[in-house]
Amino acid sequence: MHRNMEYISALPNSGIKHIRIHWLLSLIKFSGFDINQVPKYDFTALDTFLDHLMEIQVFPVIELMGDIFPVKDNIHGIYFMWKDFSFQLVSHYLTRYGQRTVLNFRFELWNEPDVLSYNILNYSLTDYLEYAYGVASGLKAGARRMNSMANIPLRGPAGLFKSIERHKLCYGLLMACNYNVSSCPIDVLTFHRKGDNSSTAILMESIELLDILREKYPNLDLPYANSEADPSSGWSKNVTLYADVNYAHTIVSIVLQHWNAILDGSLNRLESISHDNSFLSFHPFEFLQRTMLARFVMNNTEPKTVHFIQKPVYAALGMLSALAHTANKMETNRNVSYVLSIGEQYAAALLFSNKNTLDDHIDIKLDLNYWTKSPNATFGYFAEFLDQTRTNPHSIWTYYKNPPYPNETVFAEMMHAQGPHVLQNPKIVENQSFIKLAITFNHPWIVLVRICAASISKPQKVKNVRIRSIDKNKILILWNDYEYSNNERCIRTYEIYYAAVAMPENTDHQMLQWQLITSNKHIPFLSYCHQISTPNEHFAGYYKIRAIDIFGRYSEFSKIYKYKMKSKQSQLT
């Protein structure tokens, strides 16, 4: 699971910023009562997990759910238990990580509390309301202990909101809030609405639900979020859509349709949408489940190893992250949908086919007058794409008859097909009012064009380099970007240099013989899998990384990092 999360963190511009894991609080252990019969907890296991998230710069969505304490043995009742637990939880992590970090966490009530498989404590509506108000009170008290002005928002009720008869807890909470708005425990209303394999259905059902809730509870005026905006329910089902660019295309459509709904006022208080797709796939459906990565558990190796292949949906989320907060409304022209994001020194255009796009050759013309008013401007642009032919690892896997344990050749071919690929190499132009691109793909396809002014700053040094072992022949290298303002990131690719040494302990790193291992390779995101040519038990290697932008300018190199086989990586000072 840790490597799955490492990949999630490796999208640029914090393409995925939060991760939600059910039953996360099961890592906390109840350790007894103090002399006042107040529960005590051991946070050690959760500390370790969250420390890892902090290292890779991903924030948790903490669902306040689980059988954490012995209910029957506590004389204080449900409200006190959850108030005290929430207080201890938030106080512990404010002390451990600080207010600035914890305010980036998200805290949410019990996931889908009306579903029996989740409501393991068999809470009635009265119990649930005590729980919800207790959690909210504990979070507020914990936050104000650190800072009297601090507030940690609570999200909820994370419900399906089907019939009132079957979903009494979620509707009951909103009824209580509508009756007394000032004491409502939630700050963001969260719900789950999926589609019938249709991006439009998710949007329409969300709008319909919110209309119903406004009519029933007119006093409520909360921001809202769809925490599971997925094409269909059941992540582990065998669904062909999830295997290739079709899913990537669907996710882009879901995101941009909701963005349009914010801009046109249909969902004017939409805070966010989330996708329930960070699961670990299993055989024989490595590509066919609702995941961003295809997972291969190599039970034929000693020791057992696990390999991941990035599906096109992973690349699509990375491409979406190139759109800044200035993104305009999605438009459609000649069966091509597109959205433009325009800043002072940076612009991006994300284009994608729709189901009616039958042409396999489309000429795209982007008018730069929307972006720059200077007739003598110098700028560079660069284009990447996803399509079913060249960026489809699943098609390679099926070509080789769906092997449960792919060999090195199959893995290499699948990794090469990971997207996005380059459509247009960087091109520097002056005194030009438009650019042209020829798209020769069949539906579905996605194209990202990034345009940067020559005056934009050169790339900054990458940081937080990590190295993880995959097997005796492969390691995964990961890093973090500098945080570019307003997502104005003009990086084209990364160069990774490697120096092999046999005995690393006394090596002078100034004398290392560096080899570029990413020559002629497009590295769009913040990870790279390095195949080691001559592994042995004494093997060690040194790595350094630098970014290259659209204008061919280099960042400084990262700090040099050392990797030793069967040993943790370490940083050279």
Image: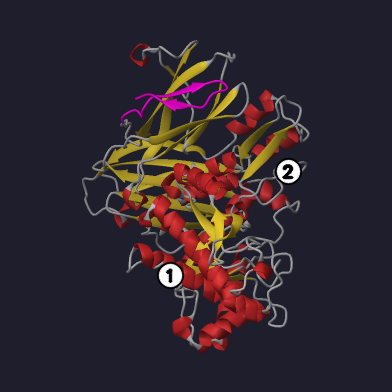
How far from the left and from the top, in percent, is residue 333? 49, 60
Q: Residue at x 74, y 33 (%)?
A: 399
Task: Read off the residue under disc 1.
Answer: 140
Kind of residue at disc 2: Phe
Q: What label sits on residue 159 in the rendered view?
A: none
Kind of residue at disc 1: Lys
Task: Read off the residue under disc 2.
Answer: 282
Q: Which residues are magenta?
A: 556-573
User: Contact, CB < 8 Å: mark 2 with mark 1?
Assistant: no
| Residue sitting nearer the eye, 422 or 219 | 219
Q: Reply yes or no: does residue 20 show up in magenta.
A: no
| Residue sitting nearer the eye, 26 or 115 | 26
Mark 1 crowdedness (10 Å alpha carbons): few <14, some 14-19, many ≥20: many
How far from the left and from the top, in percent, is residue 572? 38, 24
Callout count = 2
Q: Reply yes or no: does residue 565 show up in magenta.
A: yes
- Mark 2 to mark 1 CA distance (whole Å): 41 Å
